Amino acid sequence: METPRSQPQPWTTVRKEATVNTRARASDGNAAWQRRMPTLARWLHLYLSMFSFALVLFFSVTGLTLNHADWFGDASRTSEYKGTLNASWTNVTDTSKVNKLAIVEYLRATHQPKGAMSDFRIDATECSVAFRGPGYTADVFINRSTGAYQVTETKMGLVAVINDLHKGRDTGKTWSLVIDASAIFMTLVSATGLLLLLFLKKRRTSGLLWTLIGLGVCVALYLFLF
């Protein structure tokens, strides 16, 4: 007499179906995410590239002008001005009582120096004030006893201006943030481009190979030159 086979209990069947459905949903979710990743990487790479196009182009071009400043002639212009300010602002025994604010405001109103005040020095007989900006310098020397002063202002050419912007020299905190933002955008453009390459099965191997070759060439040049 044959032993009857045990029938699966209803709750066992339900548990197995739930497990299968959960695995199917997880698999579908992973597949959907894998399908969306190339699209997202392509979208980020495209629009980050377009948004940062002007910044990337600027720092690329100025990298060349900075490295070959000798290609461009000296377009700087130097002017000198003289004048006399209120001697009571400077002719004081205690140097801490020199009226720096009044002096700087007077110079700005009279000669409109560009850039920010970068230095204000006081010695026994003279005060010196320096204004600095991209491609611009203005140095003021003031006789403390009489208030007579001389301004030497130098305006450099366009190439010097954009080179200073590239280096962030005498550009202030706002431009420093622009440089930081540019670096972040360039990093994101490079990262999304590499991520996009990983999803191109036909070109992934050759693309990564050329990436490694480029990296190796940079390292070799550094070791060879330095």
Image (cartoon, helix red, strand yellow):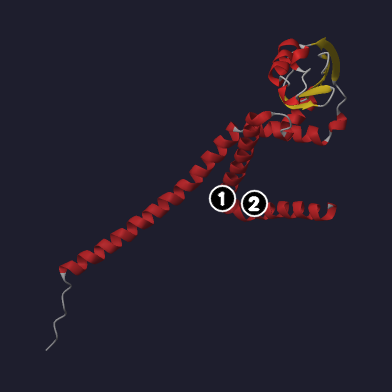
Looking at the picture, which amino acid does disc 2 mark?
Gly
The image shows residue 63, relative to residue 211, as above or below, that is above
Taking the spot 67% from the left edge, 55% from the top edge, the residue there is: 209
- For this rendering, which residue is in front, 168 or 132? 132
Q: Which residue is mark 1?
A: 200
Mark 1 surroundings: few (<14), some (14-19) or many (≥20) residues within 10 A: few
Taking the spot 63% from the left edge, 37% from the top edge, the residue there is: 180
CB of mark 1 within 8 Å of CB of mark 2? Answer: yes
In the picture, which quadrant includes the N terminus? bottom left
- First-in-chain label (1 vs 2): 1
Residue 101 sits in which quadrant?
top right
In this view of the protein, can residue 71 be seen by the observer?
yes
Residue 151 sits in which quadrant?
top right
Taking the spot 53% from the left edge, 40% from the top edge, the residue there is: 44
C-alpha gap between disc 1 and disc 2: 9 Å
Residue 74 position within the rendered picture, expressed as x and y whole percent measured from the top left: 87, 24
The image shows residue 219, relative to residue 36, as above or below, that is below
- For this rendering, which residue is in front, 109 or 21? 109
Residue 207's tag is: 2
Taking the spot 54% from the left edge, 51% from the top edge, the residue there is: 199
Residue 100 position within the rendered picture, expressed as x and y whole percent measured from the top left: 71, 21
The image shows residue 189, relative to residue 166, as above or below, that is below
- For this rendering, which residue is in front, 115 or 41? 115
In this view of the protein, can residue 132 be seen by the observer?
no
Left or right of residue 177, residue 82 in this image: right
Looking at the picture, which amino acid does disc 1 mark?
Leu
The image shows residue 196, relative to residue 102, as above or below, that is below
Residue 173 sits in which quadrant?
top right
